[in-house]
Amino acid sequence: MNYIQNIKKLRQEYGFTQGELAGPGLSRSMISLIESGRSVPSLKTLEIIANKLGVSASVLLEDTSVRDSGERKIDLSLINEKITICQTLIKANKLLEAQTVLRKTLNETNDSVIYKGVLLNYQGQILIKQKEYCKAIDIFEESLFYFDPSKHMKNIIDVYLNLAQLYKKVGNYSEAIDRALYGHILTESKSIDLESSYKFNFLFVLAYCYCKKKEFLKGRQTISQALTMINTNEVNNINGDLYMLKGVSELYSNENIEAVKSCKRAIEIFEVYDNKKRIYECLLNLGIAYRKLNKLHQSYAAILNSFEIATNLDEVMHVQNIIYELSLTLYLLKEYDQSKEWIRKGLSIMPSNVEFDGMLKYQLSKIYLKEKNVLEAEKLILEALDCFNNDVHWQAQCLHHKADILHEKLDKENAFLAMKESSQLILAAAWR
């Protein structure tokens, strides 16, 4: 009864408990009885167990002592079974066990080029689950050398999609765009039948990265192309992210009426999926768009709603940014006391973000200048400047405000110098 030893050996080798192996039509107690030899499984039961273990029923029935003895050629069916096992383990989040299978399989194939690309692909997937994104990038890049475009086009497209998404995740937007563009070109090949989601996912990466690089025209063109696909094909709730991106690109292009529409559409989609993180992000963008349209009360309501959701989710870093936007809207409403109260709340948040602290101090300095409290305004703007060592835009903005303060103090000479320094920073940034 070879199946007794084989079931137990494979189950333990891949890290499954009897309970984890169990499922519909197969209880944990039945597995225990089979492994102890107290119950003889039907062929149907053997097939259920074999499927769970990623092998065929014949493998459970064979004599492994004969199979393992002596030299043998590469058994392609056995390698394919091991690959199936690896897939099963990755899905079950048994990553160490999956790595063990990969190493053994690589040894059995003698690093055969035929399987090296596939096995590296699975290794990359394991590293993604372990959040080792840079290592995963190296593995996927290496895997491309082992795939033959005439035989493995789908594998190659999978790799390019993984690479595009990984480079996006680590913030290397130029490389992400490069991989996404090439992958998208490959999806146009007539020699392979692909799901529409591949093209959509490549377009989403491109749209996201273009917007991050502030190439908003390219971003919007890509978004429009992807939205056309949404209208003609069933695509998952990533279309909410797409409308959110569309709103951001419109916001930066000062097409604020369209930005309001896009943000509202994104919120509608995210509410269906109860995606609260995306909802508060969209509400913040919506509030900024309303402010640009001078609809200040609507801006305040949207941003306040965003603050409440983000606070409930304990999104500390984002809460500081939301408070800055809230204080800016209140400043324009001339609600200076309320604005100061919110800023103080933002500055008390721990752990804090240095740049957000600078933004809040800058806004507080503007309020004090409005109230003619020049000494407090000057003290705060100097503190704000110290927060922006690497941000030329904010350095220039703070220096411009410093010039306004010095002008109010009737120190015209130093006001001129501060304004000159601000202008030089802006010009230097423009020439980069």
Image (cartoon, grey):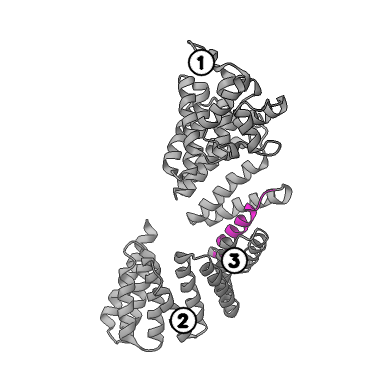
Mostly what secondary structure, the magenta segment?
Answer: helix
- Sequence order check, earlier mark of 2 and 1: 1
Q: CA distance from mark 2 to mark 1?
A: 75 Å
Residue 25 in view, yes or no: yes
Q: Position of residue 128 (x, y in %)?
A: 49, 42
Q: Secondary structure beneath disc 3?
A: loop
- In the image, residue 194 sits, relative to residue 295, either above or below, namely above
Question: Which residue is disc 3 drawn over?
Answer: 255
Q: Secondary structure beneath disc 1?
A: helix
Is 162 situated left or right of 345 in this image? right
- Sequence order check, earlier mark of 3 and 1: 1
Q: Position of residue 37 (x, y in %)?
A: 62, 26
Residue 288 in view, yes or no: no
Question: Which residue is disc 2 drawn over?
Answer: 339
Which quarter of the figure is the N terminus placed in?
A: top right
- Based on the picture, tell me whether residue 183 belongs to the magenta stretch: no
Q: CA distance from mark 2 to mark 3?
A: 27 Å
Q: Are marks 3 and 1 in contact (CB under 8 Å)?
A: no
Magenta-drawn segment: 235-251
Q: What's the amino acid at mark 3?
A: Glu
Circle 1 Cα neighbour tier, 10 Å, few/some/many (<14 / 14–19 / ≥20): few
Q: Are marks 2 and 1 in contact (CB under 8 Å)?
A: no
In the figure, residue 428 lies in which quadrant?
bottom left
Question: Which residue is disc 1 drawn over?
Answer: 68
Viewer-side residue, 333 vs 197: 197
Circle 2 Cα neighbour tier, 10 Å, few/some/many (<14 / 14–19 / ≥20): many
Is 323 situated left or right of 290 in this image? left
Viewer-nearest of discs 2 and 3: 2
- Sequence order check, earlier mark of 2 and 3: 3
Q: Are marks 2 and 3 in contact (CB under 8 Å)?
A: no
Q: What's the amino acid at mark 2?
A: Ser
Q: What's the amino acid at mark 1?
A: Asp
